[in-house]
Image (cartoon, grey):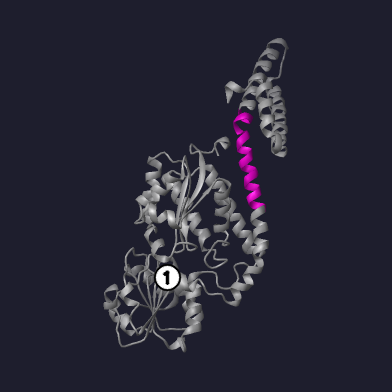
């Protein structure tokens, strides 16, 4: 990436781990809170990294950034999570330069999602870029790349049906409830945690179960009250969690806690209870698994559902890939143009110097010389010349290096670049 003059880092990398090779426990070791992501970005800036974004979701934790070696990014991740380098090496992936770019396109358009067509990740990539920009580790390359991925995502939504039907873990959880629980309208449902997944799950519960017996609990009660007000649901205090679990038939756990929040002690052993754990790290303790009255489903199990809707979406993968190919191709063309930027800039400066010297000479030689008009005309000529050079370099990429060398030699630009 050095020849593109976009970063002090030698290469652009994507490092991380996802549902494909890392189970929920390992993903939990490498998950990042909002504070953790901010601290990681700040340390990256201190270490001289000038382009980096980080995402951490229930399905993946990834860093996209410039570095001399991928270990710089791996070290950052391990220092700000509970994961170790040894764990990372067993399940992780590292992509470099064009492969790293392609990976972001696959992720941001839902092709790499645990549930095909899940487009929630694109908003998370947007927020990740905003966070990097706020800290000061977002460069023009990342901004252009993110915008290109957003463009591809929008086109796929508008031009294909890749996102039709269930498109997220939150929807899949409700679909599971509808398929597995009889008379769900009459069941008591408790939703613990009202972050993004919790909010989406709540909306899907209200919309698809037609159930009015839904209770919300969140550590910060105000957040739960805002959502409850929208759907006319009950809200209880965090202190009432155990008693509400006792009354519940279905418990959906969607907190952002780093340690289990639901343990065996909180559960009434004489009543059947379905628990859906939508959290990473897992928020239901291991000792709950052995309880005979409890059915525990984790998001990884939900994501393996292959209903007719998911099968239908697979038909649109080729069309989505064509859209990605087109938008990614445009991005790579822009990237190639970055290679020419120093030479074009130096050439423009050289032509301007020649122009200024000639206009100064003619103004002294010609009576009533119209310097203002001459300035306008000469600047337009320079711009036309620049456009011709730029178009030649853009259209003839196979010999662009030779063309650059020739331009530098003819106009003696070596010292200016």
- Using the image, determine if residue 34 lies above or below residue 394: below
Q: Is residue 266 left or right of residue 164?
A: left
Where does residue 343 sit, x and y in percent of width and height? 62, 29
State which region is magenta: 326-345
Front-most of residues 236 and 184 = 184
- In the rendered view of the protein, which quadrant contains the C terminus? top right
Where does residue 163 sit, x and y in percent of width and height? 59, 67
The verdict on residue 176 being magenta is no
Which residue shows up at 68% across the image and 17% down it? 359
Where does residue 320 sit, x and y in percent of width and height? 65, 61
Residue furthest out toward the top: 365
Report the residue marked by disc 1. Answer: 278
Within 10 Å of disc 1 (Cα), the crowding (few <14, some 14-19, many 20+) is many
Front-most of residues 82 and 353 = 82
Which residue shows up at 69% across the image and 38% down it? 397
- Using the image, determine if residue 266 lies above or below residue 392: below
- In the rendered view of the protein, which quadrant contains the N terminus? top right
Q: How many marks?
A: 1
Q: Quadrant of residue 288?
A: bottom left
SS under mark 1: loop
Q: Is residue 378 left or right of residue 34?
A: right
Which residue shows up at 68% across the image and 57% down it? 322
The verdict on residue 331 being magenta is yes
- Using the image, determine if residue 36 lies above or below residue 310: above
Q: What is the magenta segment's predominant secondary structure?
A: helix
Q: Is residue 238 left or right of residue 96?
A: left
Where does residue 232 sit, x and y in percent of width and height? 42, 78
């Amino acid at each position: 990436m050095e020849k593109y003059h976009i970063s002090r880092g030698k290469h652009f990398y994507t490092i991380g781990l996802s549902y494909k090779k890392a189970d929920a426990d390992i993903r939990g070791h490498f998950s990042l809170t909002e504070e953790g992501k901010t601290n990681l970005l700040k340390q990256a800036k201190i270490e001289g990294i000038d382009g980096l974004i980080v995402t951490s979701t229930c399905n993946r934790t990834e860093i996209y950034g410039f570095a001399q070696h991928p270990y710089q990014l791996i070290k950052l991740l391990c220092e700000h999570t509970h994961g170790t380098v040894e764990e990372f090496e067993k399940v992780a992936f590292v992509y470099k330069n064009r492969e790293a770019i392609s990976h972001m396109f696959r992720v941001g358009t839902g092709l790499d999602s645990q549930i095909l067509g899940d487009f929630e990740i694109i908003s998370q990539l947007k927020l990740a870029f905003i966070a990097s920009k706020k800290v000061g580790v977002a460069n023009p390359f990342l901004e252009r790349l993110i915008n290109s991925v957003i463009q591809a995502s929008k086109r796929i939504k508008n031009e294909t049906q890749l996102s039709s039907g269930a498109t997220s873990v939150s929807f899949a959880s409700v679909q599971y409830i509808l398929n597995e629980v009889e008379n769900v309208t009459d069941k008591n449902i408790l939703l613990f945690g009202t972050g993004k997944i919790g909010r989406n799950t709540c909306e899907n519960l209200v919309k698809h179960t037609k159930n009015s017996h839904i209770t919300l609990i969140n550590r910060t009660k105000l957040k739960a009250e805002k959502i409850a007000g929208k759907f006319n649901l009950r809200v209880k205090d965090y202190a009432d969690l155990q008693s509400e679990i006792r009354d519940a038939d279905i418990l959906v756990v969607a907190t952002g806690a780093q340690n289990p929040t639901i343990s065996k002690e909180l559960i009434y052993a004489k009543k059947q209870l379905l628990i859906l754990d939508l959290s990473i790290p897992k928020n239901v303790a291991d000792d709950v698994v052995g309880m005979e009255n409890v059915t525990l489903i984790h998001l990884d199990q939900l994501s393996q559902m292959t209903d007719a809707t998911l099968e239908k979406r697979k038909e649109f993968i080729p069309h989505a890939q064509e859209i990605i190919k087109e938008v990614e191709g445009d991005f790579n063309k822009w990237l190639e143009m970055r290679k020419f930027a120093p030479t074009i800039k130096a050439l423009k400066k050289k032509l301007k110097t020649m122009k200024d010297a000639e206009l100064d000479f003619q103004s002294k030689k010609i009576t009533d010389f119209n310097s203002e008009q001459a300035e306008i005309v000469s600047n337009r000529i320079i711009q036309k010349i620049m456009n011709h050079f730029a178009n030649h370099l853009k259209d003839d990429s196979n010999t662009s290096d030779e063309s650059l060398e020739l331009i530098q030699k003819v106009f003696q630009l070596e010292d200016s670049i």
